[in-house]
C-alpha cells in the first residue's frame, strides 16, 4: 500500500523499537519521514533505512522533554517540506522500581520524557495541522495506562496521562479535521523491554529470558508483539480509513485486558 505518498510524517523515538518501526512503515508507504531522537547515531541509521524505501528522510536530534529542541526540530521539518501530515510520539523511557525506592529525580525524569514530551510535540505540531485543516496525531501510550503491574508507578502514571492528554487535544482539534488518538500496546519485544527484563528478572529470581517468557503469558495469545505490528495500527490511524476515529485509546494487547 502507498497511502502516504508525498505526505510528511514526524516520528519521535525513531532510533529503535516502535518508533523505528513506525518510521519505516510510513517510508514504505511513500511518506517523507522526519526521525527525531536523542540517540543521534541510531537515529541517523533509521533515516538511512527510510531513504532506502524511496522517500526523503531527515534525522534530527531532539530531546522531547526540552521545548527548544522540539521547536527546532519542527522548524527544520517545515523548512524542508512545508507541512506535517502525521505526528507519532513514540519517544519514551521506562523504569522497574518498587514504589518505596522511586526517587523524585527518577519520577520527574520519566514524566518529563513520557508525558511532557508528548505534550510538547503535540503543542508544537497542532498549529501547523490547524492551518492545514488536516492531519493525524498518534500518541504512544501503553496498557500500563489502563492497567498496571508492581514497580511501575511512574511509568503507569505517565501513560495514563498520555491518554488524558490525547482526549483533550482530540477535542480541541476535531472541528478542524485533525484526528488525535492513542495506541496502548501490551508487551512488545523492543530493546526497552529487554532492558526491563534484565533488571526485573534478577529482582524476581529468574533470568531475563525467563522473565520475558513469563510476561508473554499475560495475554491469551501467549506471546509478545513485534514492533511492526504496532506500526501497522499507527499507520491505519493516520490513514483516510480512520478519519472518523478520534480521541480513542486503542488497545493492542493480544487480549490482555480481556483475560
Image: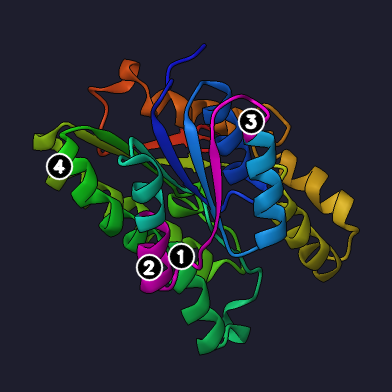
Give the mark nearest the N terminus, 1 or 4: 1
Dot in front, 1 or 4: 4
Give the mark nearest the N terminus, 2 or 3: 2
Q: Residues within 10 Å of mark 1 (few under 14, many from 20)?
A: many
Dot in front, 2 or 1: 1
Residue 72 visible: yes
In the displayed orientation, state which residue is furthest to the top: 1
Residue 206 placed where, x, y %? 89, 60
| Callouts 2 and 1 close, C-beta under 8 Å | yes
| Callouts 1 and 4 close, C-beta under 8 Å | no
Position above or below: 18 against 127: above
Q: Is residue 217 left or right of residue 154?
A: right
| Callouts 2 and 3 close, C-beta under 8 Å | no
Residue 254 visible: no
Give the mark nearest the N terminus, 4 or 2: 2
Kindly report the distance in space between the C-alpha atoms of the residues bearing marks 3 and 4. Answer: 31 Å
Q: Which mark is residue 64?
A: 1
Question: Which residue is labeled 3 in the image?
Answer: 228
In the displayed orientation, state which residue is furthest to the front: 79
Question: Which residue is labeled 2 in the image?
Answer: 116
Amino acid at each position: 500500500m502507498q497511502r502516504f505518498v508525498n505526505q510528511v510524517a514526524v516520528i519521535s523515538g525513531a532510533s529503535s523499537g516502535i518508533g523505528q518501526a513506525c518510521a519505516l512503515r510510513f517510508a514504505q508507504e511513500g511518506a517523507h519521514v522526519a526521525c527525531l531522537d536523542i540517540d543521534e547515531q541510531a537515529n541517523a541509521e533509521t533515516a538511512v533505512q527510510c531513504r532506502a524505501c524511496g522517500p526523503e528522510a531527515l534525522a534530527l536530534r531532539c530531546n522531547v522533554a526540552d521545548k527548544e529542541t522540539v521547536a527546532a526540530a519542527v522548524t527544520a521539518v517545515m523548512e524542508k517540506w512545508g507541512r506535517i501530515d502525521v505526528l507519532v510520539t513514540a519517544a519514551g523511557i521506562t523504569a522497574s522500581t518498587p514504589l518505596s525506592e522511586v526517587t523524585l529525580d527518577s519520577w520527574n525524569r520519566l514524566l518529563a520524557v513520557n508525558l511532557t514530551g508528548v505534550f510538547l510535540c503535540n503543542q508544537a505540531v497542532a498549529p501547523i495541522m490547524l492551518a492545514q485543516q488536516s492531519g493525524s496525531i498518534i500518541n504512544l501510550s501503553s496498557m500500563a495506562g489502563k492497567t498496571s503491574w508492581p514497580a511501575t508507578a511512574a511509568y503507569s502514571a505517565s501513560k495514563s496521562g498520555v491518554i488524558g492528554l490525547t482526549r483533550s487535544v482530540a477535542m480541541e482539534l476535531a472541528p478542524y479535521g485533525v484526528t488525535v488518538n492513542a495506541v496502548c500496546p501490551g508487551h512488545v519485544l523492543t530493546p526497552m523491554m529487554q532492558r526491563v527484563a534484565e533488571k526485573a528478572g534478577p529482582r524476581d529470581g529468574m533470568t531475563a529470558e525467563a522473565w520475558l517468557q513469563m510476561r508473554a503469558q499475560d495475554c491469551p495469545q501467549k506471546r509478545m508483539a513485534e514492533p511492526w505490528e504496532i506500526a501497522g495500527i499507527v499507520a491505519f490511524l493516520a490513514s483516510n480509513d480512520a478519519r472518523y476515529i478520534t480521541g480513542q485509546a486503542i488497545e493492542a494487547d493480544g487480549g490482555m485486558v480481556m483475560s
